[in-house]
Image (cartoon, helix red, strand yellow):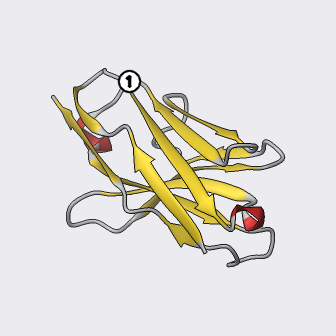
């Protein structure tokens, strides 16, 4: 079992920045991937970014060039630096883990709210 705790959400004006954190505890040996997803009211949860232990990263097209993911493998912590925020970035942001084997080590955090006003 892996327990994830996100923090760093808040309310900012468009163009502002926030840095989200996700700390994993428990059976963290299974973690190969740490990722961020988001869900806006009335919409489905969508992928934002992932980071593998080997440093491979990926971003949704909507956040490329504005968001940056990083990870401290030793401390099982991931961050999502969000710059040039837009009102459409408003959502609950969730941290998720994944293992080397597909669908393994699949855990979600409770989420942290990000609100961007115009």
Q: 112 left or right of 107?
A: left
- Residue nearest the observer in this picture, 77 or 34: 77
Callout 1 secondary element? loop
Above-or-below relation of 82 to 29? above
Q: Which residue is mark 1?
A: 84
- Measured as percent of width and height from the top left, residue 88 is found at 27, 43
- Measured as percent of width and height from the top left, residue 36 is found at 51, 52
Q: Quadrant of residue 45?
A: bottom left
What residue appears at the point 55 percent right and 70 percent down from the top-left corner?
107
- Measured as percent of width and height from the top left, residue 62 is found at 45, 43
The residue carrying pointer 1 sits among few (fewer than 14), some (14 to 19) or many (20 or more) residues within 10 Å by Cα, namely some
What residue appears at the point 66 percent right and 47 percent down from the top-left corner?
58
Q: Quadrant of residue 110?
A: bottom left
Q: Quadrant of the N terminus?
A: bottom right
- Residue farthest along the left direction in this orientation: 118
- Residue farthest along the right direction in this orientation: 54
């Amino acid at each position: 079992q892996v327990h994830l705790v996100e923090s760093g959400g808040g309310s900012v004006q468009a163009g502002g920045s926030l840095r989200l954190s996700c700390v994993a505890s428990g059976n963290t040996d299974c973690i190969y991937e740490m990722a961020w997803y988001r869900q806006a009211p009335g919409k489905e949860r969508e992928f934002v970014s992932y980071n593998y232990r080997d440093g491979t990263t990926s971003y949704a097209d909507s956040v490329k060039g504005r968001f940056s993911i990083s990870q401290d493998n030793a401390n099982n912590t991931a961050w999502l630096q969000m710059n040039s925020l837009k009102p459409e970035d408003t959502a609950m942001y969730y941290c998720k883990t994944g293992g080397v084997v597909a669908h393994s080590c699949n855990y979600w955090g409770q989420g942290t709210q990000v609100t961007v006003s115009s």
